[in-house]
Amino acid sequence: MQQRRLRFAIFGNTYQAKSAETVSKFLNCVARHGGEVCIERDFHKYLSRQHDLSIDAAEVFSGTYFDANFVVSMGGDGTLLKAANYVGARQLPIIGVNTGRLGFLADTTTEEIEATVDAIFDGNFSTEEHAVIEVKGDISGSPFALNDIAVLKRDNASMISITASINGEYLTTYQADGLIVATPTGSTAYSLSNGGPIVAPQSGIICLTPVAPHSLNVRPIVIPDTAEITLSVESRSHNFLVAIDGRSEKCLEGTTLTIRRAAHTIKIMRLFGRNYYSTLREKMMWGKDNRN
């Protein structure tokens, strides 16, 4: 059977030595199938200079300027979030190869690379659709987030007041260090560390989780992802931070932010037999008895 000629765009972080070994293995597997790779410029420079890795790439690209059938993220979940931001609305499946630590999104191990590449060329895989949210306001960078959008106080500032409305109806004013607006994908990230619930993908919800609220009776709330969230912030320092999947920028007091579900989704590639629940069970070590 004649195999398809596929092209892979590779993103990676530039501080994990394991990435070089993993990339070499991935390149060899793709070459064996007659595929092509293109590599993000900073990652290519890192591999070439720091690890003296010779890469036969069809293209070295910057940002969104690449042509591929699949996107490969070499690193942890943060690297995959970066790749997802560059993919945007292009609907390219993302393969998350984990060279980091936990890896909820990037759950393909180095040992599974050969099986993963074989499955892609044979068409034996599935894709999960993950919701994206966007923020409108005085934002200079990309407004889209796969995980979460957080409104936060500055490092040396007092807590902030965040007035939240849902579809124009007043919800509450949070007196807190911040507020996280998380997708189901982001429910196992920053939101979870602040007491938010774990939410399965495709649940059709958005979760609002306060960060260190001043009042103990303020709890996370889950709302439909068809809702429009409006936030306004007051701060003694007269400014605050907006973190969009970890990409932070400063906003001035008085800025109104509107958050809603974006029109596009992000596709995450999964091997058959692997799904969200198996990954969750493994990463959270549910059912594991540590007494021995």
Image (cartoon, rainbow, N blue to C red):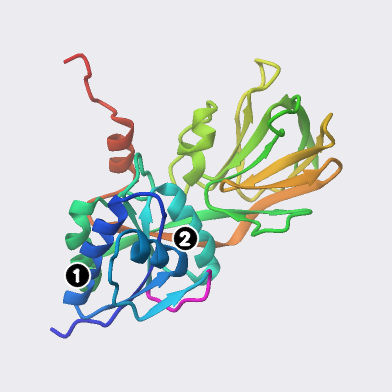
Amino acid type indicated by mark 1? Asn
Judging depth in this view, the residue of 214 and 57 nearest the camera is 57
SS assignment at label 2: helix
Earlier along the polypeptide chain: callout 2 or callout 1? Answer: 1
Q: Is residue 57 above or below residue 80?
A: below
Q: Position of residue 36 (x, y in %)?
A: 30, 78
Q: Position of residue 214 (x, y in %)?
A: 70, 18
Judging depth in this view, the residue of 128 and 149 nearest the camera is 149
Q: Is residue 175 above or below residue 25?
A: above
Q: Position of residue 257 (x, y in %)?
A: 76, 47
Q: Is residue 167 visible?
A: no
Whether pointer 2 and pointer 1 mark residues with C-beta atoms closer than 8 Å, the reply is no
Q: Residue at x 50, y 43 (%)?
A: 186
Q: Is residue 121 rendered magenta in the image?
A: no
Q: Is residue 154 above or below residue 83?
A: above
Q: Which quadrant of the figure has residue 262?
A: bottom right
How many tags in the picture? 2
Magenta span covers which residues? 63-69
Residue tagged 2:
83
Q: Quarter of the image containing the C terminus? A: top left
Q: Quarter of the image containing the N terminus? A: bottom left
SS assignment at label 1: helix
Q: Which quadrant of the figure has residue 170?
A: top right
Q: Residue at x 72, y 58 (%)?
A: 140
Q: Which quadrant of the figure has residue 287?
A: top left
Q: Is residue 66 rendered magenta in the image?
A: yes
Q: Give the numbered dot on residue 28.
A: 1
Q: Residue at x 33, y 32 (%)?
A: 284
Q: Magenta span: helix, strand or loop, mainly? A: loop
